């Protein structure tokens, strides 16, 4: 039996595999998002969920990050999503919001 090494993408048929617009620790890429994440992570989580038309309480979840990653063909795994959110939850939330903002600016969201 062969192990599954890639996840199926949502709407990524024939689209090249992408990467995150910024790294997990690129806080200076958007200071406003970083400050919001540091001082009001619940607000940032709700903004992310709202951007993705999901329930406010889902913004800081592994499922939300995985949904976003697969929707845009971003490389990674559920395990990686879990580890990022488990070890660096605020930085990971900020990364997701920065990526959403950059994709909105490129009309790719």
Image: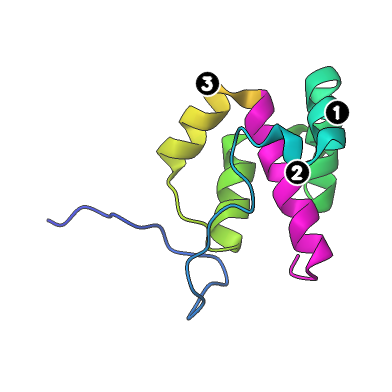
Q: Is residue 60 above or below residue 5?
A: above
Image label count: 3
User: Quarter holding the N terminus?
Assistant: bottom left
- Residue 37 screen position, x and y as percent: 79, 27
Residue 32 appears in the rendering = yes
Q: Which residues are magenta?
A: 90-109
**Residue 10 quadrant:** bottom right
Q: Secondary structure at mark 2?
A: helix
Of the pair 96 and 32, the residue shown nearer to us: 32
Residue labelled with disc 1: 36
**Residue 29 quadrant:** top right
Distance between the Cα atoms at labels 3 and 2?
18 Å
For label 1, the crowd category at 10 Å Cα-Cα, with few meaning under 14, some 14 to 19 and many 20 or more, is some
Of the pair 58 and 75, the residue shown nearer to us: 75
The mark nearer the N terminus, 3 or 1, is 1
Tell me, what colour scheme is on the image? rainbow
- Residue 31 screen position, x and y as percent: 83, 34
Distance between the Cα atoms at labels 2 and 1?
10 Å
Residue labelled with disc 3: 87
User: Quarter holding the C terminus?
Assistant: bottom right
């Amino acid at each position: 039996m062969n192990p599954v090494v890639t996840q199926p993408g949502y709407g990524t048929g024939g689209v090249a595999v992408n990467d995150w617009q910024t790294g997990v620790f690129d806080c200076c890429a958007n200071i406003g998002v970083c400050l919001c994440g540091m001082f009001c992570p619940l607000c940032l989580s709700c903004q992310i969920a709202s951007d993705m038309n999901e329930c406010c309480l889902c913004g800081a979840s592994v499922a939300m990050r995985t949904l976003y990653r697969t929707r845009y063909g971003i490389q990674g795994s559920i395990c990686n999503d879990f580890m990022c959110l488990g070890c660096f939850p605020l930085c990971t939330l900020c990364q997701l919001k920065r990526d959403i903002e950059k994709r909105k600016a490129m009309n790719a969201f």
